[in-house]
Image: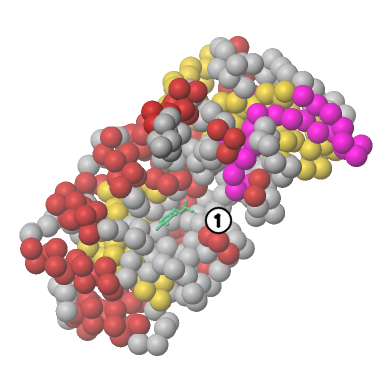
């Protein structure tokens, strides 16, 4: 998010009472920024191919219905990986023809439902393909059907998010003994199996490694089509995974850079013979989300200043549990929402949860924070505030979209804050006596 737009939004959020002592943490989404990223994605691929491309937003990156609706309005579809995500996509009005179902653990019922609706399905493994055999034989389906392969090109900097390693749990591991032959045969035996899917990982994967994974899937498609003597594979799903820059406001790398790299790494992929599906998540939303949290108290401990804020593990789970992999910036604002200036002091920024490791950042150089100040955490639009962690029964914060119009900021609530009644209800509040004799 551009810093002037962020400053405007923070100030307006305070003035309009979205952030207050009784609602000490909120999340903001920059609607114009999301639209700009969606447009950049569409034009980056349009610049390198005339083939039809479905850009399916990976719902897990920001599972909020109005966000899915906005992206659909921008011409995107969705990639879903659970019954819950499928329900969100349906609620957002995204049609089956713009929906792709991936997931390593689809049940028979989920597959049956997807095929009945005509949703595209990528099987994860050959056992799942055998399940599809039975379903395809029992009823006609409009669903495009494919198979996920793991090109085993290697890991990026974050092991937990690298899906094309030698032993990844996803897809058919192509370099394993006999696997490639088995995949080719599976396609030759099934004329209805027409897509290949690959996704090399999320965050920390270099662009060249992503492109290498896609090139491997393309080479396999060419092999299958040659052996089949026809264009059996008609679509290649290249997954998502464009990394996001968490150290500044700069949006790098860009979709255009990646699309151009694909054009040089696998030119045949883009020559019009193959339709494409993409599944970007983080890169569409991360830069457009910001957490705002009030500083409740400040103290020193072992001479280190610490600001205790209302944003911690519940909204930034990955950062708190694995700070080296997921560093976030933290910016200081005063109680009225103006950027705090002045001498920088090394300090820690803590969250509200009751464990010592609940720290958003340590040894950060910032103007010294004071009670009632506001900390602003940019780049949290994907996999952060939309992924609430229920530790300490902390309330799920409200999410507001905003648009900046000249000197006015207009907010629209995407999701209101969770209420205490809802917390109690979700904690078995209607079954108080369930464990009594
Ligand atoms: C998570 C995931 C994505 C999205 O990854 P991003 O890094 O958010 O772009 C796409 N496809 C599959 C199969 C995934 O598991």
The x and y percentages for residue 9 are 58, 22
- Along the line of sight, the residue nearer the viewer: 294 or 274: 294
Does mark 1's beta carbon lie closer than 8 Å to ligand 1?
yes
Residue 100 in the image: above or below residue 375: below
Q: Is residue 145 visible?
A: yes
- Res 15 → quadrant: top right
> Can residue 324 be found in the magenta stretch?
no
- Along the line of sight, the residue nearer the viewer: 274 or 398: 398
Residue in the picture at 70% in, 29% down: 309
Q: Is residue 68 left or right of residue 383?
A: left
Q: Secondary structure at mark 1?
A: loop
The x and y percentages for residue 403 are 48, 23
Q: Which residue is mark 1?
A: 203
The x and y percentages for residue 61 are 46, 45
User: Quadrant holding ligand 1?
Assistant: bottom left
Q: Is residue 205 visible?
A: no
- Please give the range of residues in magenta: 297-319
Residue 185 in the image: above or below residue 383: below
Residue 112 in the image: above or below residue 71: below
Total marks placed: 1
């Amino acid at each position: 998010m551009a810093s002037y737009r962020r400053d405007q939004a923070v100030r307006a959020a305070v003035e309009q009472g979205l952030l207050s002592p009784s609602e000490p943490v909120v999340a903001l989404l920059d609607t114009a920024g999301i639209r700009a990223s969606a447009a950049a994605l569409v034009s980056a691929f349009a610049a390198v191919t005339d083939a039809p491309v479905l850009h399916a937003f990976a719902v897990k990156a920001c599972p909020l219905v109005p966000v899915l609706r906005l992206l659909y309005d921008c011409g995107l579809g969705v990639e879903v990986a659970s019954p819950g995500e499928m329900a969100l996509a349906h609620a957002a009005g995204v049609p089956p023809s713009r929906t792709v179902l991936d997931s390593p653990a689809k049940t028979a019922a989920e597959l049956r439902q997807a095929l009945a609706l005509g949703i595209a399905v990528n099987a994860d493994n050959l056992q799942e393909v055998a399940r599809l055999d039975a379903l395809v034989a029992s009823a006609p389906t409009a669903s495009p059907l494919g198979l996920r392969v793991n090109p085993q090109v290697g890991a990026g900097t974050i092991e937990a998010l690298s899906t094309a390693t030698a032993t990844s749990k996803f897809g058919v591991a192509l370099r394993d003994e006999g696997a490639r032959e088995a995949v080719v045969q599976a396609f030759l035996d099934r004329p209805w199996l027409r897509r290949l899917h690959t996704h090399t990982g999320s965050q920390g994967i270099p662009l060249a490694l992503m492109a290498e994974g896609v090139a491997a899937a393309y080479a396999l498609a060419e092999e299958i089509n040659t052996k089949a003597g026809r264009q059996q594979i008609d679509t290649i799903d290249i997954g998502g995974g464009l990394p996001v820059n968490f150290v500044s406001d700069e949006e790098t790398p860009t979709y255009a850079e990646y699309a151009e790299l694909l054009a040089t790494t696998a030119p045949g992929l883009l020559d019009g013979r193959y339709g494409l599906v993409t599944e970007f998540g983080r890169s569409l939303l991360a830069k457009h989300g910001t957490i705002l949290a009030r500083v409740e108290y400040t103290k020193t401990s072992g001479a280190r200043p610490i600001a205790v804020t209302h944003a911690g593990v519940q909204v930034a789970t990955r950062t708190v549990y694995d700070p080296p992999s997921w560093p976030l910036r933290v910016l200081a604002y005063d109680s009225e929402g103006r950027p705090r200036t002045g001498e920088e002091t090394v300090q820690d920024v803590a969250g509200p949860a009751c464990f010592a490791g609940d720290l958003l950042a340590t040894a950060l150089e910032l103007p010294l924070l004071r009670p009632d100040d506001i900390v602003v955490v940019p780049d949290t639009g994907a996999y952060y505030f939309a992924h609430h962690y229920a530790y300490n029964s902390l309330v799920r914060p409200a999410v507001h979209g905003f648009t900046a119009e000249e000197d006015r900021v207009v907010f629209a609530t995407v999701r209101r804050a969770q209420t205490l009644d809802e917390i109690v209800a979700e904690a078995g509040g209607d079954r108080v006596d369930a464990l009594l004799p």
